[in-house]
Image (cartoon, grey):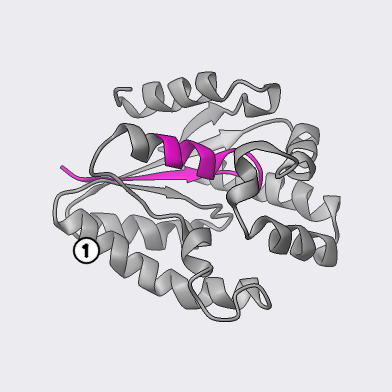
Amino acid sequence: MARLLHLNGPPGIGKSTLARRYAAEHPGVLNCDIDVLRTLIGGWSDDFAAAGGLIRPAALAFISAYLAEGHDVVLPQMLARVGELERFEAAATGVGAEFVTVMLTDEEASVVARFHARGAGGADEVDPWHEQVRRIVAEEGGDGVLTHYHRRLGEVLAARPDALEVASLDGDGDVDATYRAVLTAVGAEA
């Protein structure tokens, strides 16, 4: 049975990094990173949120089609509303695929620090949308927005007892341990 593996969590928690690795180590898995897809919309850097609104329906169709062909998808996307998460779940279950959510978690203060450290060097430099996300967070209230996301994601986790919680150790520099914990949680092999 095909599976949609949703990696959820706050900005900077490591969703995209883990999804890239998962797809690289599991041939045939589609890494459907909606933030990457946003960059294919003209004007995305001027209105990141609008580009997201335009691309989400296409992403849902893309995911459903890929799953319907019997292939797995990994989705690194913060979904801080249960209703939005359920749209992706319905895209999977509607074609007979399994839906699994992994909530990547860390302490609130660490989430804020990780967000500010993101893109300060290393592999994150290749993600062109980080600057737009930094601007949006700053415009919407800075660190207060990040703590709000953290709390809302906690509410999503509480509302979804089927979600798998994995402590993200990337902030401690241990991407490998976090990746192994995700694999263990979802019953996948390295």
Q: Nearer the viewer, residue 104 or 119?
A: 119
**Is residue 95 visible in this depiction of the protein?**
yes
Quadrant occupied by the N terminus: top left
Residue at the far bottom in the pictured view: 42
Compared to 166, does 155 lie above or below? below
Residue 73 % position (x, y)? 31, 48
Q: Is residue 125 magenta?
A: no
Compared to 47, does 147 lie above or below? above
Residue visible at 30% across and 26% down in the picture: 188
Residue 161 % position (x, y)? 45, 37
Residue visible at 63% across and 28% down in the picture: 170
Residue 180 % position (x, y)? 44, 20
Give the quadrant of residue 66. bottom left
**Is residue 10 visible in this depiction of the protein?**
no
What amino acid is labelled 1 in the image? Ala
Q: Which residue is mark 1?
A: 65
Give the quadrant of residue 29. top left
Circle 1 Cα neighbour tier, 10 Å, few/some/many (<14 / 14–19 / ≥20)? some
The answer to whether 157 appears left or right of 72 in the picture is right
Could you tell me which secondary element the residue under label 1 belongs to?
helix
Q: How many marks?
A: 1
The residue segment tinted magenta is 1-21
Give the quadrant of residue 182. top left
Residue 115 % position (x, y)? 74, 44
Residue visible at 56% across and 52% down in the picture: 78
The answer to whether 138 appears left or right of 99 in the picture is right
Quadrant occupied by the C terminus: top left
Q: Is residue 7 magenta?
A: yes
Q: Nearer the viewer, residue 104 or 116?
A: 116
